[in-house]
Image (cartoon, rainbow, N blue to C red):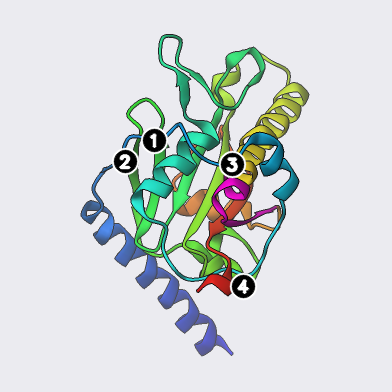
Amino acid sequence: MWTKRILALLMVVVFVAQAALGADELKPIALPKPQMDGGKPLMQALKERQTLRAFSTRELPAQVLSNLLWAANGINRPDSGKRTAPTAVNWQEIDVYVVLKDGVYLYDSKEHALQPVVAGDLRALAGKQPLAKVVPVNLVFVADRAKMGRAADADKDFYSATDTGYVSQNVYLFCASEGLATVVRGMVDRPALAKAINLRPEQRVILTQAVGYPKEKE
């Protein structure tokens, strides 16, 4: 019994060491300019909005990923830096982490780029359901409570949850427009995921959301 525990501990140590060694291999990714025209009319996208849990392993093209992230929480008013998703007091406290097969990135809305966080395939940590391990893109919505000033803890809890909902719905509507599958997930080992992506104590994982092509289109 002790031998199994020691072996399991060694495996974890090796995984962490490999991730640390590979962290420098990740490079920032400059995303293509988002396409802000086209797509389905809003009412049609609302009609077709749905949750799908069967995903293809096919990766999203760079342009589709670019459009997805801009739709989720990109800057739509460059003069003011305001986003496609609203936040209370314009705190802009919701960060979108992107978990891909090669590593985890932070969506940088100002540069419209992906900034490297940690190397390695951490998709399994983005949800307790088996689909998390195979879906090409897992979005992690993180609330940075340090950006919320002196608000009471109860207000920080409430607004970070509602503000995450706006971002998630943007993702749902984009997926409906583009024929993609998506499902938002609350079943996440938040402490384990937060540790793996090096979050500060003031940062909280709220929800994750899987995005990919429907399995039947494989």
Residue 183, quarter of the rendered image:
bottom right
- Image point 73% across, 18% down: which residue? 152
Tag 1: Cα neighbours inside 10 Å, few (<14), some, or many (≥20)? some
Per the image, label 2 sits on a secondary structure element best described as loop
Tag 4: Cα neighbours inside 10 Å, few (<14), some, or many (≥20)? few
Spatial CA distance of label 2 from label 4 is: 29 Å
**Residue that label 1 marks:** 34
Per the image, label 4 sits on a secondary structure element best described as helix
Instruction: State which region is magenta.
Output: 174-185
- Image point 71% across, 56% down: which residue? 51
**Residue that label 4 marks:** 130
In the image, which is nearer the foreground, mark 3 or mark 1?
3
Residue type, label 1: Pro
Image side of residue 192 versus residue 154, left or right = left
Q: Is residue 75 above or below residue 124?
A: above
Image side of residue 62 versus residue 195, left or right = left
Does 175 lie within the magenta span?
yes
Spatial CA distance of label 3 from label 4 is: 31 Å
Q: Which mark, by number, is residue 40?
A: 3
Asked if labels 4 and 2 touch by Cβ distance under 8 angstroms, the answer is no
* Closer-to-camera residue (45/185): 45
